[in-house]
Amino acid sequence: MANKIITPSVIAKEALMQLSNKLIFANQVHREYKNEFKKIGDTVSIRKPVKFYAADGATLVKQDVEEGNTSITVNQRKHVGWEFDSAALTLSIAEYSERYIKPATLVLANVVDQAVAALYSSVWNTVGTVGTTPSTFAHLAAAAQRMDEMAVPSEPRAAVVNGAAKWAIAGAQTALQVQAMAGKAYRTGEIGEVADFTTFGSNNVKTHTQGTKAGTPLVNGAAQVSTYQSVSTTGNKQNLITDGWTASSAILKKGDVFTIANVYAVNPVPAEGTTGKTVLPYLQQFVVNADISADGSGNATLSISPAIITSGPQQTVSAAPADNAAITVFGTASALVPQNLTFAKNAFALVTVPLIMPDGAAFKAQENHEGLSIRVVKDYDITNDKEIIRLDVMFGTAAIYPELACRLVG
């Protein structure tokens, strides 16, 4: 049977399918939004869930509805373009896909996945040991335990680890008595379901460069609590005034994690019959939202998450930090640290929006499905007698609920 001429719609459908099949991080995150045309720099609004607590007794206790949203800026547009002979359009779609579409969508999928992976810098919950590659059930279980303690829903959860961790964990599974799991791990390195996570390996896991941590940092001023006592569009952030650093331009990097003496984490779910949160037996971790330098006197104001909230539905800590409370930065100064991620779907969001279709192109199509969108456009270069085609995606990412994620460092 003769091959049919490949249409733009056929190419767009195949490209979208191939893109979806190649995504790892992006296939595990929130992708729901209002489907509409956007431009670079536009924003998409995503509603955040309401947080309630269970009141005690028969008497009605009315609670404030603290419903907010977060905005995702559509700030990334990527494309892959290539030239080909017109005869290529007489190939079967399978041949054309193998020769052109698969390599192109692999590149686009990696770019999108890298953007999602970079959201690690918004996550404060961190487990693992710098310099030790996660390699056992216990390593993944430590992340699962932290997520349990933070009341993260058990389904669905995903873990995405780098190549070193993937093969180390897969190797550990070959010693299991579960034959199906051990066999897949031995033959293909497939990890599967481990410690309540659907686990994937990806070369797009980011590596974080830590700051110098120079000095003996302290909180400078008591009662530094957030005015953020309810959900708002500004996000769960605040400034923390500190001193005791050694003057430096790189004491902390965006994504560095630290704790404050005597400021403990709390279970997000209130204790039975109360509005108070149960204090957990470890210090609350905070993440730095921007690179930080200290002035000549060792002072530095840090932008941090989560905000320090000591009561109410959004409570994050057991108590406000005291003046001169010691700050301890996680990890090793200036180290390069792999940032494997474990997370629930709503921790992160990806928005890929439809692009405006060009009026001057006859060969064009756009496909949208399950929160993904890709556009194909073809034109003719009369000077060089070449057909030119491009695949475009436009997207934005955000950590909409970073408390539903945990970093598993290596």
Image (cartoon, rainbow, N blue to C red):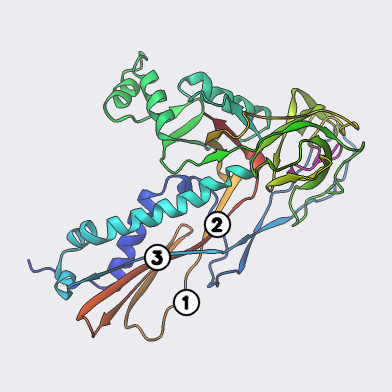
Task: Name the amino acid type tagged 3.
Answer: His
Q: Residue at x 66, y 36 (%)?
A: 212
- Residue 367 image position (x, y, % from top left): 39, 67
Relative to 268, 14 lies left or right = left
Q: Which residues make up the magenta segment?
A: 303-315
Q: Earlier in the sequence, mark 2 or mark 1?
A: 2
Q: Looking at the picture, which amino acid does disc 2 mark? A: Glu
Task: From the image, state whether disc 3 or disc 2 is nearer to you.
Answer: 3
110 vs 275, nearest the viewer: 110
Instruction: Tell us which disc is closer to us: 1 or 3.
Output: 3
Residue that numbered label 2 is attached to: 32
Residue pictured at 36% horizontal, 55% vertical: 107
- Write down the residue under mark 3: 79
User: Where, by quadrant of the figure, is residue 103 drawn?
Assistant: bottom left
Q: Measured along the vertical axis of the image, is residue 127 above or below residue 356?
A: above
List the residue tagged with mark 1: 356
Tell me which label, 3 or 2, sits earlier in the chain: 2
Is 372 part of what is drawn in magenta?
no
Q: Is residue 319 visible?
A: yes
The quadrant in which the N terminus is found is bottom left
**Mark 3: which secondary structure?**
strand
